[in-house]
Amino acid sequence: VKHGDITERFGAKLLPFRDPDGLQLELLESAGEASLKPWETTEIKADAATRGFHSVTLTLNQVRPTATILTDIFGYKSGEQSGNRHRFTTDAIDHASVIDLLEEPTAGRGRGAAGTNHHIAFRVKNEEVLMAFREKIERKGLDITPKIDRDYFYSLYFREPGGVLFELATDNPGFTRDEPLATLGSALKLPARYENSRSQIEQVLPVIKDR
């Protein structure tokens, strides 16, 4: 795995590296995620195991329009700044609560490819909250989709001013709607519209080994 040197950002140590698809990722040492259960394997023990997502970085030509969406619609607070990196945080959640906006005026538009992120998702409690956000987003003059039924949740999509696709998704009805929590994830579940293609889908999926 190609990686850089350990560095520090906003008081936290991090190790930058690239995944097999070339995506830029970072392992970050953060006390904020200490309460999360570590993802252990036979080779990786709890003290070195990952515990979840810490943050996401959006590279934009201009930070201000996107910053306005984060603060005015989603209630994020503007925080620390280091060079062209602007940090935004929220107290609404305990972890994965950080969004960094990186201002690169000459950066080209990103392209979707293997390993890239399709969108940034924001979690909301239910459909009532979802539709309240839809009204706020429309009042900002942004185009947003109708409510979409994703079987396990309902969602909306819109592009923020910098062109990044944002999703809002509900907790309900949840992934236990068609299987108990005790066996969650042990079988392949498909939306009804894809059931007729189950055999073809299963043939092309990679084998996942539980270590």
Image (spheres, helix red, strand yellow):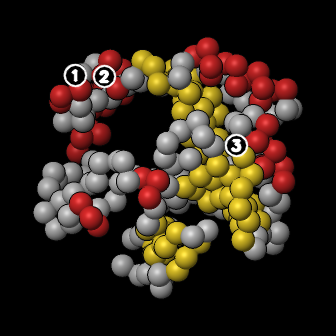
The residue that label 1 is drawn on is: 180
Question: At which x and y percent is residue 55?
Answer: 54, 55
Q: Nearer the viewer, mark 1 or mark 3?
A: 3
Q: Are circles 2 and 1 on residues that touch, CB within 8 Å?
A: yes
How many numbered marks, from 0 up? Answer: 3
Residue 60 in sight: yes
Residue 108 in sight: no
Q: Is residue 107 above or below residue 186?
A: below
Q: Is residue 16 above or below residue 177?
A: below
Dot 3 falls on a residue whose secondary structure is loop
Q: CA distance from mark 1 to mark 3?
A: 35 Å
Q: Residue at x 49, y 73 (%)?
A: 13
Pick the quarter of the image with the N terminus: bottom left
The amino acid type, in three-letter code, at marker 3 is Tyr
Say whether disc 2 or disc 3 marks the residue closer to the N-terminus.
Answer: 3
Q: Residue at x 52, y 69 (%)?
A: 12
Q: Are circles 2 and 3 on residues that touch, CB within 8 Å?
A: no
The amino acid type, in three-letter code, at marker 2 is Thr
Comparing 165 with 46, the one in front is: 46
Question: At which x and y percent is residue 51?
Answer: 35, 54
Q: CA distance from mark 2 to mark 3?
A: 30 Å
Dot 2 falls on a residue whose secondary structure is helix
How packed mark 1 is, by other alpha carbons closer than 10 Å (few <14, some 14-19, many 20 or more), is few
Left or right, 158 with reference to 139: left
Left or right, 94 with reference to 176: right
The residue that label 3 is drawn on is: 76
The amino acid type, in three-letter code, at marker 1 is Pro
Comparing 121 with 85, the one in front is: 85
Q: Name the disc covering residue 176, or none.
A: 2
Left or right, 55 with reference to 144: left
Quarter occupied by residue 29: bottom left
Q: Residue at x 23, y 26 (%)?
A: 181
